Amino acid sequence: MAKSSIYESYEQDAEAMEHGIWITDLMIPVPVKIRSFYSKKVRELNNVLTKRYQQAMLAGNGTLPPDKADSRTVELVAKGIVVNWGLAAAKADGVTLPDEAEDMTDREGNVLPYSVEHATRVFKDLPRFRDEIFALAITNETYRKAALDGLKGNSVAPSSPSSPSTAPIPQS
């Protein structure tokens, strides 16, 4: 049995972390492009939000009240982590999508193109969806270089029970 390199397990794709990667196997079949929680943009936004909520945290002995914690997370995900969503955006980036892929829609079935305003509304209304996106943004496997290198040029992304499937990365 060949030994696995620690780099294969932990080395991250810096470009994918900073600019985002399309995720296509959420509980809903909507492609969503997300950047890593550890990207420069998200870290900077996180610092701004920490300063903004500092007084509330001090008043709460280091924790935010649930409503403020939710508002903070919604803003972090809507403005920092999510880069884009939807069929047209994914196709414009050259992503091969599964047949069941759909656009993001509201309750009435109207297409919601990505905007911070739309994302904020969706993540306020659907905290479990927000939490799923956040979890993927902090997961090592989402941006693991060896896994992403293996996707280049493939039409179907590999999946495993412990990792999200991501759409293939278009060849540049």
Image: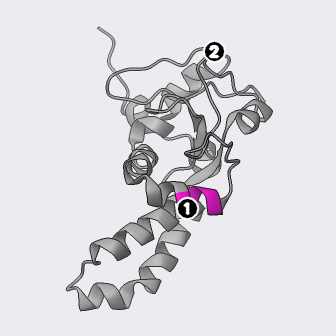
Left or right for 70, reference 48: left
Which amino acid is tagged 2?
Answer: Asn
State which quadrant residue 105 falls in. Answer: top right
Q: Secondary structure at mark 2?
A: loop
Residue of label 1 = 120
| Magenta stretch: dominant secondary structure | helix
Q: Is residue 113 above or below residue 116?
A: above
Residue drawn at x 38%, y 47% as measured from the top left: 135
Q: Which mark is residue 63?
A: none
Q: Is residue 111 above or below residue 114?
A: above
Residue of label 2 = 154
Query: Where is residue 170 shown, x and y percent of the image?
Result: 72, 27
Q: Secondary structure at mark 1?
A: helix
- Does the magenta portion include 111? no
Marks 1 & 2, CB-CB < 8 Å contact: no
State which quadrant residue 2 falls in. Answer: top left
Q: Nearer the viewer, residue 10 or 40?
A: 40
Q: Which residues are magenta?
A: 117-121
Model colouring: one colour
